Image (cartoon, rainbow, N blue to C red):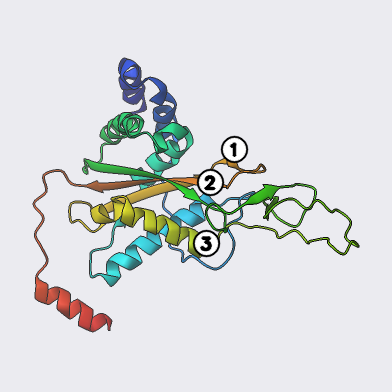
Amino acid sequence: MRCFFFISLFISCWTFGQNKKFLIDYNQAERFFYQEQEAGGQEIRLTDFDGAALSAMVITKVNNELSRKLRPELVEDSILNKMAFSAIKYVPRKAYHDRHKWKKEKRSFDYALKLSGSKFRMLEAYRYQIDLLDYVPGGRFYFDRRIGTSELNLYAGRPNKIKDREHEDYEEPIPLSSKTEQKVVETIFEQFESRGAWKSMTSRKYSRIGLACRVETKSLNRSKRPQMYIIVFLLGKQNLQLKKKDYTERILRYDVSN
């Protein structure tokens, strides 16, 4: 199987160009599942970022919302997790903002899925960039690594001109921090709702989900708002005839759950 993969890869390398790294990494990676996990009130640690835990929280949130709306939950797919884990490492930053660049990246996702042998072939892919700073958008802040009271070395307002703590006009720097797990998951979900993913998640065309996320290291330890990238894959059976659930069955489910 691996021999076939590499033969196909090198035959098609002219088509995918810069995506070869993704395809090779995808072939070498192992499938995996996340453990169900609820988001809590702890701050997201950016210097020791746990992408697996946050990914599990996002999937848990999605399925909780689907269940609340009496929709079938999405099945976590190890192939999609593996694909997202490789994609999050090699998809260039430009693709998160450039629609045409992202469309080009999606071709390699379709190709990787084809080589996986999955019986599910209808793939939809979404990408998002998330602001992780727990501070009003557009608010003024500054970077100073000498103060040492903020993990991010970011502080609200303008730098203090007066450094002497004993001076009557001295103002204590106000440290800024990252958002909590719950706020980050809510921010991600807001992106899902406003930019198409949630509509697909509630559609009966898709039944499986996989995702991965990472912190943009170039946004840390400098005068920038820390950022995170997340890639989400949804998968369904191509040309599958999906029947709508009987309305009375949904009502009964609602009565039992309440």
Q: Amino acid at mark 2?
A: Gln
190 up-or-down from 231: above or below: below
According to the picture, the residue beneath numbered tag 3 turns out to be 181
Q: Which label sits on residue 128? A: none
Q: CA distance from mark 1 to mark 2?
A: 9 Å
Can residue 106 be seen here?
yes
Q: Residue at x 32, y 50 (%)?
A: 195
Q: Which label sits on residue 227? A: 2
Q: Residue at x 28, y 65 (%)?
A: 66
Instruction: Tell us which disc is closer to us: 2 or 3.
Output: 2
Q: Residue at x 59, y 37 (%)?
A: 218
* CA neighbours of label 3 inside 10 A, class few (<14), some (14 to 19), many (20+): many
Q: CA distance from mark 3 to mark 1?
A: 21 Å
In-image side of 119 versus 223 (left or right): left
Percent x, y of residue 183? 49, 62
Label whose residue precedes the other's in the sequence (1 or 2): 1
Q: Residue at x 47, y 49 (%)?
A: 130
* CA neighbours of label 1 inside 10 A, class few (<14), some (14 to 19), many (20+): few
Q: Amino acid at mark 1?
A: Lys
Percent x, y of residue 196? 28, 50
143 up-or-down from 199: above or below: above
* CA neighbours of label 2 inside 10 A, class few (<14), some (14 to 19), many (20+): some
In-image side of 112 versus 162 (left or right): left
Quadrant assignment for the C terminus: bottom left
According to the picture, the residue beneath numbered tag 1 turns out to be 218
Element marked by disc 3:
helix
